[in-house]
Image (cartoon, grey):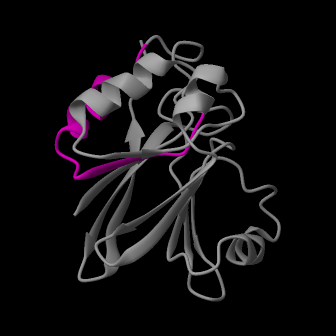
Amino acid sequence: MRLLVMSDTHVPKRAKELPSELVALIAHADVVLHAGDWVDEATLDLLLARARRVIGVHGNNDGPGLRARLPEVAHAELGGLRFAVVHETGPAQGRERRCEERFPGVDVLVFGHSHIPWDSTAPGGMRLLNPGSPTDRRRQPYCTYLTAVVAGGALTQVVLHRLPPRR
């Protein structure tokens, strides 16, 4: 099962549209996970129209329309793994333990908010992933997103992709 993972797209505030490289991958993914801060409903509609399955949540910059359509936390079983998606997890310090307590029984937690890519494993084995942002790199050297594969009940081939600078 091929996953495409993104967060903090902030369209149209940080970019007029999603990067074409990212849009091209939507149809090739079995599941697209989005960890919030879409900002506009058109981006959600684009993913819903092109993706086989979308699992998304609203973020702190998402207005009433997105909040009405998306939960604060989403849970899904994908290929034998229990996923949760949330926008914000708080400060980096103590994140793994705090998230394990907040999301018991979850194998993989996808989150956003910071625009900082993150890949770590909590003491109990939960994998935490933040794809960064494909449109707003903030203090990061690149805009980013993640791809991964779920196979045989395991998360494999987790790759952080760097996007070229916008023109």
Query: Does any portion of residue 18 appear in the rendered image?
Result: no
Inspect the magenta stretch and tell me whether residue 49 lies in it: no
Count of numbered labels shown in the rendering: 0
Farthest residue to the bottom: give it: 124
Highlighted magenta segment, given as a residue range: 17-37
| Picture quadrant of residue 3 | bottom left
The vertical placement of 137 against 161, above or below, is above
Residue name at image x 72 percent, y 34 percent: 60
Instruction: Report the side of 47 relative to 128 (left or right).
Output: left
> Residue 11: horizontal and vertical position, in percent?
51, 18
Farthest residue to the left: give it: 28
The vertical placement of 45 against 112, above or below, is above
Looking at the rendered image, the quarter that the N terminus falls into is: bottom left
Farthest residue to the front: give it: 68
The vertical placement of 130 against 44, above or below, is below
Residue name at image x 33 percent, y 80 percent: 154
> Residue 69: horizontal and vertical position, in percent?
52, 32
Along the viewing direction, whichever of 140 and 99 lies nearer the viewer: 99
Residue name at image x 23 percent, y 83 percent: 152
Residue name at image x 57 percent, y 81 percent: 105
Inspect the magenta stretch and tell me whether residue 32 lies in it: yes
Looking at the rendered image, the quarter that the C terminus falls into is: top left
| Picture quadrant of residue 166 | top left
Query: Does any portion of residue 81 appear in the rendered image?
Result: yes
> Residue 45: horizontal and vertical position, in percent?
36, 23
